[in-house]
């Protein structure tokens, strides 16, 4: 690390002569590759944005000039250059630096991110505030081509052109989302690339034609007419003139000198927004990553030389995602009305299999969760049965559509929420901990969570049999090894199952917390404490007859959920008891995530931190029994 070891801030970077930037970028590349090969991360995305990070911090006076990264998954070089070089090996791990951007991590992270398409709105807000305060610094947003197509970014562009605010947008165009980018904007950007290649070619042809004696002039005139017509069709005209942007590009996004020159040119634009169009390659610098950039967007650990993934040899049950993907295809086979939808996450959600096998009935809508939900609502009005497979955290963006377009009209849309619960290394922006609260409060929808991958298949069938909105959430990672060969069965809506019966205590859990609750009950039994364990299956509607019967017969009711407690399943049970005048009949203890942000890290470790594993449940039940026994031993006086 000849150059890099001396870069402790962006100011240090700006001391280097511009000729050394390519060498510095190469050192950063090797450092990222070497580190990611050991711990994994957003390898391909970050390799593609190294020169951009170098050039941006070189051309601008950061952090005085505000640099706003979209998503932040591609910002590893930015982190390395801004005082976090030695912390890179801790990225995404418990206690380490975040895999995305956080204002509390660095003054260079001007706006927190993790979800896509927010940078332009935030940057516009910052630029307007700058102007109101009479300050002069630059505001620069860096956004990928797929995130640019997101609804929020489009709305921001619309306002930027209208306000004519001084602002720079850098487009990191690698023709990729996580999967290949989709949509008309992708076609548009392609046309810009083609047009510019065409122009260079045409200029050369024109020069050649003009050099032909006598005939040359006439041929040149004819060629120019054709050229103008094609140029009108393909040049970035819409962005430049119609939307009020100046356009600089395209630029080789792996050439720091060219990038710095383009950015310095952009700084001169004083009278409105300007877009700098940089072309990059995802995974730049590793032969395997450049070839297979789709899979390299993010990686686990890999062999540095061959690029092959290093996987643990322990045999594991298939992931919930994989079981979802194959079951969806089975259901699509037997019911031609079922349609599969993903918002830019075909692999992450398992919809890739349906896209391949049923291309006419499967859609990747791009980073467009809001559109995805209303698109599904439209299809359901006409009798189709759309299945929206969206990560729990990303459906937050489609909440109004879920309420307004689906649930108010009680349409037949099914929501399958992957990553329900703690998502792991991606941290607070990606944990799916709010879904239970935000779904439970909406009329008309039913909400469920399977205890294992076998029950997940039953729930998928149940959702499709149910006429109306339905949601199922399930966790990240591997199943528990349940039977997935048996035919799925339709479950009775709003009915739980008693898995273990006895004692004065009932543990009521759903989804990922059912098995840890069972283990806790087994361990409690070894200590002579018998407990009833209920798999609630449904968060909405509740199995009220079962729950009220438990309230009447047990001393203690412990609810366990991998979700925020506020508005969660435990709260639902308290409401049920209150509605039935049973709130004083039984002591309720709610286990779940308290009202604070959950950091990034290994899900196992994080769950243990909040007591959401077999040991934690065991301890909490025992402590709660002790409290009850104490109270029984010492009768409380009124007012004491
Ligand atoms: C609202 C939302 N939906 C989905 C995602 C998941 N996601 C993370 S990065 C990414 C692709 C972004 O593509 P692009 O903006 O072109 O950047 P690149 O990774 O190609 O550099 C997606 C879909 C997200 N972060 N936020």
Image (cartoon, grey):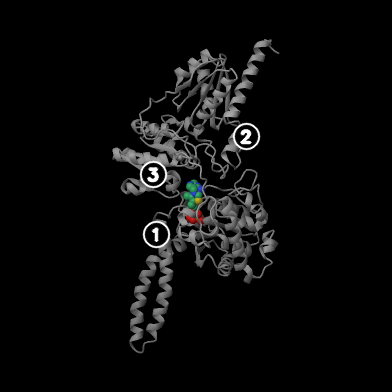
The image shows residue 68, relative to residue 599, as above or below, that is: below
Residue 562 is drawn in which quadrant?
top right
563 vs 107: above or below: above
Q: Is residue 161 above or below residue 459?
A: below
Mark 3 element type: strand
Looking at the image, can residue 410 be seen?
no
What element does badge 1 sit on?
Answer: helix
- Considering the numbered disc 2 on the image, is that residue within a helix, a strand or a loop? helix
Q: Rate crowding at label 3 as few (under 14), some (14 to 19) or many (20 or more) other CA atoms within 10 Å.
A: many
- Depth-wise, is mark 3 or mark 2 nearer the camera? 2
Q: Position of residue 199 (x, y in %)?
A: 42, 73
Residue 609 marker: 2
Return the disc, 1 or 2, that comes first in the chain's sequence.
1
| Mark number, residue 283 | none
Which of these two is toward me, 123 or 509? 509
Viewer-side residue, 57 vs 37: 37
**Residue located beneath label 1 in the image:** 187
Pick whichever, 107 or 597, lies toward us.
Answer: 597
- On whether ligand 1 comes within 8 Å of the CB at mark 3, the answer is no
Q: Which residue is mark 3?
A: 341
- Position of residue 183 measured from the top left corner of the image (x, y, whole percent): 40, 54
> Which numbered mark, 1 or 2, is in the foreground of this view?
2
At 50% from the left and 35% from the top, the residue drawn is 435
């Amino acid at each position: 690390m000849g150059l890099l070891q001396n870069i402790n801030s962006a100011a240090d970077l700006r001391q280097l002569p511009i000729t050394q930037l390519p060498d510095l970028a190469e050192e950063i590349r090797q450092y990222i590759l070497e580190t990611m090969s050991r711990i994994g991360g957003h390898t391909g995305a970050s390799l593609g944005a190294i020169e951009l990070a170098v050039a941006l911090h070189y051309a601008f006076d950061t952090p005085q000039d505000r640099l706003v990264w979209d998503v932040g998954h591609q910002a590893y070089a930015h982190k390395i250059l801004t005082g976090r070089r030695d912390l890179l090996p801790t990225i995404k791990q418990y206690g380490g630096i975040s895999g995305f951007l956080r204002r509390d991590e660095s003054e260079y992270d001007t706006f927190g991110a993790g979800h896509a398409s927010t940078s332009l709105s935030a940057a516009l807000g910052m630029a307007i505030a700058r102007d109101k305060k009479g300050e002069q610094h630059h505001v620069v947003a860096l956004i990928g081509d797929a995130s640019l197509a997101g609804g929020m970014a489009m709305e921001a562009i619309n306002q930027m052109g209208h306000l004519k605010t001084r602002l720079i947008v850098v487009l990191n165009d690698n023709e990729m989302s996580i999967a290949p980018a989709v949509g008309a904007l992708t076609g548009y950007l392609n046309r810009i690339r083609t047009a510019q290649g065409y122009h260079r070619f045409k200029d050369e042809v024109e020069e050649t034609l003009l050099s032909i004696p006598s005939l040359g002039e006439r041929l040149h005139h004819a060629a120019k007419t054709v050229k103008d017509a094609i140029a009108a069709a393909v040049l970035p005209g819409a962005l430049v003139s119609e939307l009020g942007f100046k356009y600089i590009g395209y630029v080789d996004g792996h050439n720091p000198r060219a990038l710095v020159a383009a950015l310095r040119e952009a700084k001169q634009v004083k009278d409105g927004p300007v877009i700098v169009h940089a072309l990059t390659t995802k995974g730049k610098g590793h032969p395997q990553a450049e070839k297979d950039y789709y899979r390299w967007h993010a990686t686990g650990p890999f062999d540095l030389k061959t690029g092959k993934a290093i996987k643990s040899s322990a045999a594991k049950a298939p992931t919930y995602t994989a079981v979802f993907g194959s079951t969806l295809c089975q259901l699509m086979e037997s019911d031609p009305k079922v349609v599969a939808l993903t918002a830019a996450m075909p692999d992450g959600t398992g919809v890739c299999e349906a896209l391949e096998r049923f291309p006419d009935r499967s859609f990747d809508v791009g980073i467009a969760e809001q559109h995805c939900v209303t698109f599904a609502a439209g299809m359901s009005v006409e009798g189709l049965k759309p299945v929206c497979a969206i990560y729990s955290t990303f459906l937050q963006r489609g909440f109004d559509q879920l309420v307004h377009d689906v649930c108010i009209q009680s349409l037949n849309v099914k929501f399958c929420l992957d990553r329900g619960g703690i998502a792991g290394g991606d941290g607070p922006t990606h944990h799916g901990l709010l879904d239970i609260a935000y779904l439970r409060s909406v009329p008309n929808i039913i909400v469920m969570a399977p205890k294992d991958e076998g029950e997940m298949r039953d729930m998928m069938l149940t959702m499709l049999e149910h006429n109306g909105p339905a949601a199922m959430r399930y966790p990240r990672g591997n199943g528990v090894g349940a039977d997935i060969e048996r035919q799925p069965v339709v479950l009775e809506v709003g009915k739980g199952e008693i898995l273990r019966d006895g004692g004065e205590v009932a543990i009521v859990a759903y989804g990922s917390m059912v098995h840890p609750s069972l283990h806790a009950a087994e361990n409690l039994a070894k200590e002579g404490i018998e407990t009833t364990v209920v798999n609630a299956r449904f968060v909405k509607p509740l199995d009220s007859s079962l729950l009220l019967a438990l309230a009447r017969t047990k001393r203690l009711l412990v609810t366990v959920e991998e979700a925020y407690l506020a508005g969660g399943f435990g709260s639902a049970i308290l409401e049920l008891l209150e509605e039935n005048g049973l709130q004083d009949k039984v002591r309720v203890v709610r286990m779940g995530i308290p009202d604070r942000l959950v950091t990034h890290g290994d899900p196992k470790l994080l769950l243990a931190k909040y007591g959401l594993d077999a040991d934690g449940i065991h301890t909490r039940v025992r402590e709660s029994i002790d409290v009850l026994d104490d109270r029984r031993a010492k009768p409380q006086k009124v007012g004491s």
